[in-house]
Amino acid sequence: MKRLITLLRHGETVTYDARGDFYRPLTEDGKLDVQRIGAFLDKKNLHPDKIIASAAERTLHSAEKLHKTLYPGVAPDITINPDFYNASAQTLLSALTALDAETKHVLIVGHNPGISALPALIAGTDMRKKRLFPSLKPASIIMIEITCDWPSLSPASGRIVQMVDAANVPQDFPWPDRNGSQKRKRPAYFYRQSSVIPFRVTNHDNGDSDFEVLMTLSSGGKHFVIPKGAIDPGLTAIESAVKEAREEAGCIGTALEPSVGKYHYQKWGARCDVEVFAMRVEQLLPDVEWEESHRGRKWVPLNEAIETVKEEGLRKVLKAFNDQKDRFVS
């Protein structure tokens, strides 16, 4: 019986994170490159039935980004192996030999040097024959076909089917879905987004109330924004917005329905539609638990937030929130 092993090195990362190497996140290009690999595999109908990733931020996020393009609309199903963090090739091999017999195609997301050294342990004979000595670049894959069962893996077990670098696959994505004939600069799900207005209310003895909005710096650090992002496959608009609030602003709270409003803006060569919810902030995470603490954050009066945001559509939504604010006073 033929089985397939796909080895993926995580996408490009930032060079430093104050929390340590384990927490280094992907760069924007790194995220995109992994998604391009996912779209490539999807186009070839090469869908793994098991994805295993190191627990490090860069490998786990690579697995998640890949999954979103491989399985649009499906919540990620990824096995995290804590032993994969900077693991040796032998450690990765041990995980492969322990796979159940029902697994036909496994994809492993790992780190160099282990992920690049592993092919020699499962297809070394073929590599020497073809004079291949791969060192996987970020967001590149090597695919190995084997005919033995998992416990019998050896250097003579497999043959190299394909080696693919993210730079050599289509750089754009099909639109409006995986079978679409049009192209966009981001995966299709990027263009349907949700957002929260993270707020707090201070009530005074005289009956007045102060509304403040939690804002963070944009990813480029040029202006202040409220949390917003593509609706993650498998999540509702409000669930995805709450997730963005935790990641971008490091805040936890209760998002309220119905939504305050909707707006749209142009980005990545097309229209992005955004649904906006109000969220009462109940907790601010410390920097060590806040995924994007490099952004910084600040509380600003609601009226100031209205004047601060760039998109006119969002400004109108914030004004609508201002008009509705009596229902948020407790």
Image (spheres, rainbow, N blue to C red):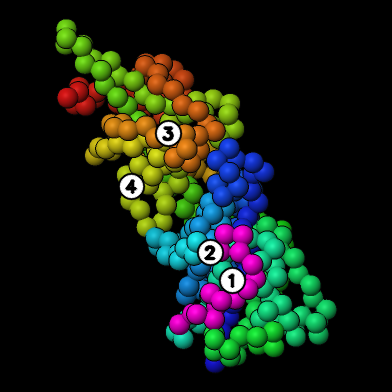
Q: Which mark is residue 239?
A: 4
- Label 3 neighbour load within 10 Å: few <14, some 14-19, many 20+: few
Q: Nearer the viewer, mark 3 or mark 2?
A: 2
* 122 with respect to 234 (left or right): right
- Label 1 neighbour load within 10 Å: few <14, some 14-19, many 20+: some
Q: Amino acid at mark 3?
A: Pro
Q: CA distance from mark 3 to mark 1?
A: 34 Å
Going from the N terminus, do you reach mark 2 or mark 1 first?
2
> Marks 4 and 2: CB-CB under 8 Å?
no
Q: Amino acid at mark 4?
A: Glu
Q: CA distance from mark 3 to mark 2?
A: 27 Å
- Picture coordinates of residue 38 (x, y %)? 57, 63
Q: Is residue 38 above or below residue 200?
A: below
Q: CA distance from mark 2 to mark 1?
A: 8 Å
Q: What residue is shown with label 3?
A: 286
Q: Amino acid at mark 1?
A: Thr
Going from the N terminus, do you reach mark 3 or mark 2 first?
2
- Label 2 neighbour load within 10 Å: few <14, some 14-19, many 20+: some
Secondary-structure class at tag 3: loop
* 269 with respect to 228 (left or right): right
Going from the N terminus, do you reach mark 3 or mark 1 first?
1
Specify the quadrant that holds the C terminus.
top left
